[in-house]
Image (spheres, grey):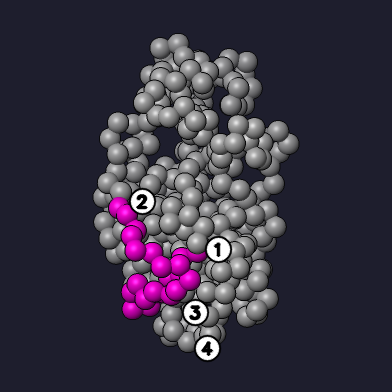
Amino acid sequence: MSQPVFRTLDDVIYGTVEQVSPLIRRVIAENPSKFTYRGTGTYIVGHGDVVVIDPGPRLDSHRDALAASLAGERVRAILVTHCHADHSPLAAWLRDETGAPTFAFGPHPRPEPGTEPVEPPDDGVEIEESTDHDFVPTDAVVDGDIVVATSELTMRAVHTPGHTSNHTCWTLAEESALFTGDHVMGWSTTVVSPPDGDMGAYIDSLRRVAARADSMLWPTHGPPRDDGRSYVEALVEHRLERERGVLDAVRSGRGSIPEIVGLLYANVREELHKPAGRSVWAHLAKLVAEGAVVVEDGSVPGLDSVYRAV
């Protein structure tokens, strides 16, 4: 299966602020993991009057690093891409410290009972990121809202559902930059995990980003991308190729997610098959919505459903 060309982020120094462009600085939290790569990159945009994007996890060292980096600055706005626990929790602290409003598409929807994975999973394998259900923005935005407009900064919301339903990227017009959160990551593909994650919405949102003319993409995790259009188009094709594999598997008579995972991820370590199953679930839900696949008993697509090609 073809893979987009990923890039690394090396020589990370935790607890320091780095000037990465004329208007952008970055502080990386020391929370490396399989979901966060080297850690959560919090962006400080502007000089004097500044905007903070994705304040990050509840981590004392990161909070202290942000406090030091923002000394003497006036925080005008706090922008959150989505409510996973490595992105939004420190927003409440920063709001209380500075009085700046928080902006996001909205809080993360509360899950229906029985739809979320057991936390922690019984076999010790993390299968998706934990969620900050406590975060509620002071100002809810919709797609296209300008949230900051100063003599130096113009920032606008770009709603990009898929990774989560409330995921939002943020533009910086003055540098033709797009802060992509987890929607586009320079080092890896993105987790899309139902029920809140939606593969169809994710692919549509990727296509929307690919059609933009941003000069630079700034993910919350990993390195920036100056090849946004070609890279995002490669991410789309990667997902569609995986979808074709899922559909072929169902057509061959493999009706359960474990059967499909066993075929498509045969060369992947078995302990990763459970998280892979949620990705297959996302593809199957998309195929059901498009009428290419049905659930045998007519219920909504689930992890334990039996699927059949139309």
- For the residues labelled 2 and 3, the Cα–Cα distance comes to 26 Å
Residue, disc 1 = 56
Q: Residues within 10 Å of mark 3 (few under 14, many from 20)?
A: some
In percent of width and height, residue 81 lies at 52, 59
What SS does tag 2 mark? loop
Front in this rendered view, residue 5 or 204: 5
Q: Amino acid at mark 4?
A: Gly
Q: Residues within 10 Å of mark 1 (few under 14, many from 20)?
A: many
Q: Residue 217: in sight, yes or no?
A: no
In percent of width and height, residue 300 lies at 62, 26
- For the residues labelled 1 and 4, the Cα–Cα distance comes to 21 Å
Residue, disc 4 = 72
Q: Is residue 6 magenta?
A: no
What SS does tag 3 mark? helix
Residue, disc 2 = 187
Check contact, mark 4 vs mark 2: CB within 8 A.
Answer: no
Residue, disc 3 = 69
Mark 4 and mark 2 lie on one chain; the one further toward the N terminus is: 4
Check contact, mark 3 vs mark 4: CB within 8 A.
Answer: no
Depicted 203 relative to depicted 279: above or below: below
Q: Amino acid at mark 3?
A: Ser
Q: Residue at x 35, y 41 (%)?
A: 236
Mark 1 and mark 3 lie on one chain; the one further toward the N terminus is: 1
Task: Label the magenta part by its dominant secondary structure.
Answer: loop
Front in this rendered view, residue 157 or 276: 276
